[in-house]
Amino acid sequence: MNHFIDRRLNPKGKSLANRQRFLRRARAQIRDAVQRSLKDAAVADIDKDRKIKISTKGTREPRFRLDRQQGGEHDFVLPGNKEFVPGDEIRKPKSGDGGQKGKQAADYAEGDDDFEFTMTQEEILDIFFEDLELPNLVRTTLKETPSRAWKRAGITTAGSPTQINLVRTMRNSFGRRLALKRPSVADVERLQAELDELEREEPQTENTRGRIVALKEKLARAEAKRKWVAFVDPLDVRFNAFSEQPVPTSQAVMFCLMDVSGSMGEREKDLAKRFYMLLHLFLKRRYEKVDIVFIRHTHDAQEVDEQEFFYSRQSGGTIVSTALEKMLEIQRERYATADWNIYAAQASDGYTQSGDARRCVEMLNGEIMPLCQYYAYIEILDEREMEVFASEDSGAELWRAYRTVAEGWPNFATKRISKPADIFPVFRELFRKSETVS
Amino acid sequence: MSGLLFTEAEWDFATLDRVYKAIEEIALDEFKLDVYPNQIEVISSEQMLDAYSSLAMPLMYNHWSFGKLFAREETLYRGGYTALAYEIVINSSPCISYLLEENTMTMQALVIAHAAFGHNHFFKNNYLFRQWTNAEGILDYLAFAKGYVAACEERYGRDEVEAILDSAHALMDQGVFRYSRPPRPSRERTLEKHRKRRQYEEDAYSELWRTLPAGIAAPAAPPIPDPEDEGDDMKLPEENLLYFFEKHSPGLRGWQREILRIVRTLAQYFYPQKQTKVMNEGCATFVHHAIMNRLFDKGLIGEGALLEFLHSHTSVVYQPEFDDRRYNGINPYALGYGMMADIKRICEDPTDEDRDWFPAFAGNADYMSVLKDAWANYRDESFIEQFLSPKVMRDLRLFALHDRAADPAYSVSAIHNEGGYRALRTTLARQYDVGIAEPNIQVVDADLQGDRSLMLHHHMHRGVPLHEQTKNHMLAHVERLWGHEVGLEEIEAEE
């Protein structure tokens, strides 16, 4: 069997280093391609492997090569002659024509052709989220009052009995017993058995009696030694140690607020859904621990699970402030600002009961914005409306009201979208790494 | 008891071993092949893709282009557009062959015969490989290269290393000595030189230098004289561009020169393979065909296995016609095997035509010695010029076209008939001459005293110019290596 080596179990991914270098090299092209490819796809598909087609710009591997179409002459041989005789003329195929390529095309086929390959979900998402970052993650609490947590800090000789480390303790105990030659129970039992046997012996000779005395002495010594070499000595005992250490707050809660009332049509909901799904995915990736709270509202707000939030219907009027109230209520109950980074995203078609917008503004200015790291408001319009409201300044009541909030709070953003293709740019803009938001 | 070595399609290592021994007996005792010791490794499809993408070498330094190749191959393979090769074989001693785990037992036998004996014999005996490659040393050298490139990335940053490798790869085709073997210091001497330089830098390092204000550099290490460089003028013109830049480029640093050397060493290592595609594959195919048939004759493999082998063999040597959708140049397996099988026929059963064309060996009882002589002493171009028989030309229905770029049509210059054989043969042989197929570019002048501009000449063969767009991309690479302006002139070569 000396000729064969089974390499199948060798570690995989030998060319991973090369792949990373390639992705890095083609970064710009890949980023474009990923954006393009995701734009038209259903958002739920975002976490799948997909084929990416990039232009070869940036990953060209040129070689000097001859261009026989441009000039000069040459001869070449082809197989499969059927009817040609010397002197025949064959019209040249137009370039780009398939068919007979001759030899020249085989030489380093290289040009501005697209290059197609498969990227894994991980790689795609990395690219997509590359320079996105929820603003203000490095929040003030990181610097000032970090929360603290008990972390393991090795082994100590003192502690409370509940923290005893049995393995370490018994290991020490065993070592000490071995070193001090403590007789085991088995040793003692063996001596006792021997003694019993001698004592039962009839008749007892001088010799036997002598051995009995010796044995008894030995047994006594063993018993005594077992007493003064304890099975577990206080010296052996070890405790698990813990120390309190600061941990940065890397947990975030995202409040997703959505209007599900009758005025939100199928299309609007679908757009909002896509925006949230993307957010959802983004958050799942970015933070160690992310809670997401879904609040839907009509004239009345409810906290619901993800499924309900996206897929169930409800009818009723529209009072946006109920959702804000609900959010505050949940925040007070479960998400203390000391431990949680709070983000909120609201999607709406911009309609609300008259007068409610003012209440919303009050709540935002007074209570919500001081708590939030970031608040994004997405207004979903149809394309006709989008043209009407081309300027940022004009809009429905809620929009105009929210604009005033945005003026006062740099971490409040408003955006409009009207078609799926708008979502990604808006998403990027809202959550790009931003210096301006302090 | 049947004498068959195997009856199932599944393989296991015990069976592989039995089959290997049977094949070895035939190859060495009956055909008297002369091979390097074999090392056969079974690998998975993913590992095969890995091997593909690093120039089919078992280890290779890291570079994005290998990642790109892997991505392409993987997409094609997973999409079902291409199948993987059954094997990869490396010109090294021991000769490493990779078998794909998915092969059936028959295929494994075929592949062992093909790679471990066919290719192996060719590598060990062909004059190009003997003269130009060092089978014993290549794996060590690659290990050195991989480590060296990684160390450079560490010291000088990935971008720097990537840039120099990009340029070096671009010039790989112009990084070989075509005619003269260059003086090469041994790897040990190279390493020793580096060790010394490092040592000097460490010895000469002084904390004090760091306290100097910026802009005043520490004294540079005195150049360690390279015995090779002494009294060395540039010996222009120079066809090996990588060698020229390694030795004479004014701006490159030591490690960059070493990387150029690594790339051109690889280019030189692969150069013989480029010149012997037809012969190499022909030899391996001929050998596996002979061995598999012998196995069957000796009652060691069954009819099922023989049919499976023949099916695979015929698809390997299939030559689509020029107007076929599958046509992608002349299949080296088809041409090489066809010619070699025909040499055997000419030896065993010559016609008058054969006696006329090949008086030297027509009717020679020992066809194997004729083939071995051809395998040892020819490359594709000379092999075709010498051995292509009229029968093979007729079988493949070869015809030659004359192409003038200015004309709207090709003209048929020769076909497989009495008047055309010789012209056809010469044309085909020329087609395999790498000296003609690749542009001939030389450094002719370097103005070291003046503005340091460099002049390259492309000697056009029959007026064929360089591809304009790639030429410009390439000049950027050349300028990076030279560090100053580079001009490229295309001049008409005198025929």
Image: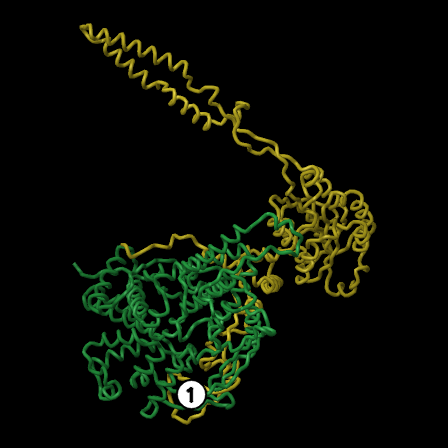
Chain colours: A yellow, B green
Q: Position of residue B196 (x, y in %)?
A: 47, 55
The image quadrant of residue B419 is bottom left
Rendered residue at 49%/74% (across/down): A109
Identity, as a three-letter code, of the amino acid under mark 1: Leu
The image quadrant of residue A206 is top left
Residue B405's place in the image compared with B271, above or below, is below
Viewport quadrant of the N terminus of chain B: bottom left
Rendered residue at 32%/16% (across/down): A188
Residue B480's place in the image compared with A302, above or below, is below
User: Is residue A156 visible in the rendered structure shown here?
Assistant: yes
Residue A278 vs residue A435, the one in the foreground: A435
Provide the residue designation for mark 1: B401
Q: Position of residue B167 (x, y in %)?
A: 53, 68
User: Is residue B262 visible in the rendered structure shown here?
Assistant: no
Residue B359 vs residue B102, the one in the foreground: B359
Q: Position of residue B416 (x, y in %)?
A: 34, 88
Residue A158's place in the image compared with B112, above or below, is above
Q: Secondary structure at mark 1?
A: strand
